[in-house]
Amino acid sequence: MEKYKKSQDLFEQAKRLIPGGVNSPVRACRSVGTEPVFIEQAKGATLVDADGNQYIDYVGSWGPMILGHAHPAVIEAIQSVLHRGTSFGAPVDLEIQLAEMIIEAVPSLDMVRMVNSGTEATMSAIRVSRAYTGRHRIVKFDGCYHGHADTLLVAAGSGVATLGIPGSPGVPEDIIKHTLSLPYNDIETFASVMQEQGDEVAAVIVEPVAGNMGLVPPDPEFLRELRRQTEKTGSVLIFDEVMSGFRVAYGGAQALYGVEPDLSAFGKIVGGGLPVGVYGGKKDIMAQTAPEGPVYQAGTLAGNPLAMAAGIAALTEIRRPGFYERLEETAARLESGLLNAVRNSGVEAVVNRVGSMLGLFFTKDPVRNFDEAKKSNLDMFSAYYRRMFESGIYLPPSQFEVVFVSAAHVDADIDKTISTAQAALRELGQA
């Protein structure tokens, strides 16, 4: 189409140079039957592609843009440190300030280590847990994606689910044989497994709010059972808050639900959207990390001044009084509008929401785990996605990803999104 001519030309060039033409699989948009547009710029809640088409953005760089794109405070912070240099591979004062802010916000954290991605954070948390306990086995949950480290690519959600890949070639059986994946929100199964095998389990890792099978809220009792059983067995409880951290509450899902893990992982939201990851937790566990302890983990760009400055600016903004209350009102308004649109369309669909994270599943039944999420009508989601996209609403191109609301979304954005969804769903209901 002429409307997307520049993006199409760029995609053809990219396919000759980059596998699939993209640097992260879901971006290829194959599961929704389209091709990606290339983004030229973004401001607030608006994206502009290479052809000048504008979109209301609900991807938010897959979550971290809680303030919206190019927020003035974040841009100013980055500019203020550019003259100092972009990377030193050595300590910088900004690392201390950001670490203090994160630890102050999240009650379970005594110490943190900066890394460069969520994958690095969860991978490192697993390694530290194994060293701390002297055990090998890991328990995770179906549909929870914790990055692409070998140990954790078992029944993963996100792009793995989107592309229909059960695991991944290149991951030896000898590595994943120590990883057990259980149904999310299934208290009885988890308790049974821990009673039988808990003394072999180094760590239990979970997304406390699942965001990689679409948005699936936890049963609060499920999270409490994870805490009870891991305390009994001496296993480390890891909350992967790469998505939910500072998204559903300032202290993350653990603050929202009142359950404290032993270790936590956070992602780019603590770096103002720049490449950052963080893992942290109890001092005696974190003391395993080199150079204080024997567990090796390193990164040249870890704690680089640009990301640290951006993170300080972002956390300063989101901890201002009333920030989360306003964000909750905006997200609740979108949720209510989508629910009404579904009811009036004749389409069978479910809307889940926790804070500023939402999921719309094309199924008639509640979605509480990965098996239920997979019952969604993927063809209908694809059709819905295309109709929304053509009308300027930029959604994640997968049934198994999350819609993110930002502080930059204004009433007009929400109104347009709801009216567009009403038309799209009504058309699908009549098809």
Image (cartoon, grey):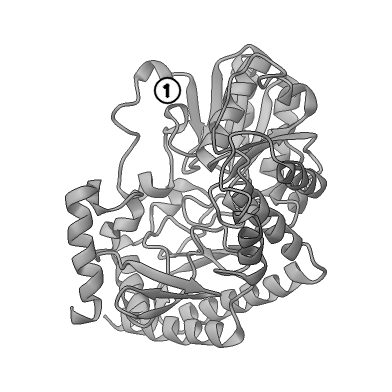
- Quarter of the picture containing the N terminus is bottom left
Q: Quadrant of residue 126?
A: top right
Amino acid type assigned to the residue bearing label 1 in the image: Ile
For disc 1, the neighbor class at 10 Å (few under 14, some 14 to 19, many from 20) is some
Q: Residue 163, percent across and down?
A: 30, 48
Of residue 90 and residue 429, the one placed in the foreground of this image is 90
Q: Residue 314, percent across and down?
A: 68, 60
- Quarter of the picture containing the C terminus is bottom left
Q: Residue farthest to the front?
A: 83
Of residue 247 and residue 155, the one placed in the foreground of this image is 247
Q: Is residue 86 left or right of residue 36?
A: right
Q: Residue 323, percent across and down?
A: 75, 70
Q: Element under label 1?
A: helix
Residue 99 vertical position relative to residue 375 in the rendered view, above or below: above
- The answer to whether any part of residue 359 appears in the image is no
- The answer to whether any part of residue 383 appears in the image is yes
Q: Is residue 385 left or right of residue 410?
A: left
Report the residue at 34% width, 20% height from top.
172
Residue 116 vertical position relative to residue 34 in the rendered view, above or below: above
Report the residue at 72% width, 75% height from top.
326
